């Protein structure tokens, strides 16, 4: 492993960002100097992007779900997203959009928001399943 300063270009939410990681731990071939981009390297770049964009981390989202005693399934339903999407956010597989990141702190902080979202979702489902 070698520690280097690295500038990464990362596309997120339809935009291209340049992220500087001052101390990226990356395998480098001792013979030719080629950098090897492993999953651990990608995780470091993703963490730097989250930090630069000031996005909620999966750990903060998990902590908030625990604090409000809500399952992933319940939260996903109220947020209007697939449970698999929320799972990808919580497991460091995908970064949430800026719009969702703006909503999440409000969702976690205010029970009224969580209640309003479930009511809105229920109304939409009721309208969609009501025969003409």
Image (spheres, rainbow, N blue to C red):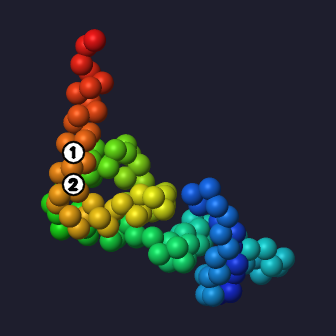
Mark 2 in CB contact with mark 1 (< 8 angstroms): yes
Rendered position, 52 above or below 98:
below
Total marks placed: 2
Q: How far across and down, in percent of the image, does residue 44 sit?
A: 55, 75
User: Looking at the image, which is closer to me, 20 or 115?
Assistant: 115
Q: Residues within 10 Å of mark 1 (few under 14, many from 20)?
A: some
Question: Does dot 2 land on a helix, a strand or a loop?
Answer: helix
Question: Does dot 1 land on a helix, a strand or a loop?
Answer: helix
Instruction: Kindly identify which residue carries mark 1.
Output: 118
User: Looking at the image, which is closer to me, 22 or 108?
Assistant: 108
Q: Is residue 93 left or right of residue 129?
A: right
Indicate the quadrant containing the N terminus: top left, top right, bottom left or bottom right: bottom right
Q: How far across and down, in percent of the image, does residue 93 sit?
A: 48, 58
Residue drawn at 25 percent across, 13 percent down: 131
Residue drawn at 59 percent across, 68 percent down: 42
Q: Tag on residue 114?
A: 2
Residue drawn at 68 percent across, 86 percent down: 5
Quadrant housing residue 18: bottom right
């Amino acid at each position: 492993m070698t520690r280097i300063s690295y500038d990464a270009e990362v596309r997120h939410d339809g935009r291209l960002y340049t992220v500087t990681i001052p101390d990226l731990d990356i395998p480098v071939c001792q013979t030719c100097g080629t950098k090897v981009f492993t999953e651990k390297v990608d995780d470091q770049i993703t963490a730097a992007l989250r930090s630069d964009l000031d996005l909620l981390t999966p750990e903060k989202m998990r902590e908030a779900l625990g604090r409000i005693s809500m399952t992933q399934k319940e939260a996903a339903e109220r947020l209007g997203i697939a449970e698999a999407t929320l799972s990808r956010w919580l497991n460091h597989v995908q970064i949430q959009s800026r719009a969702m990141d703006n909503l999440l702190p409000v969702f976690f902080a205010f029970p009224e928001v969580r209640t309003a979202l479930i009511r809105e979702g229920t109304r939409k489902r009721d309208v969609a399943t009501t025969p003409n």
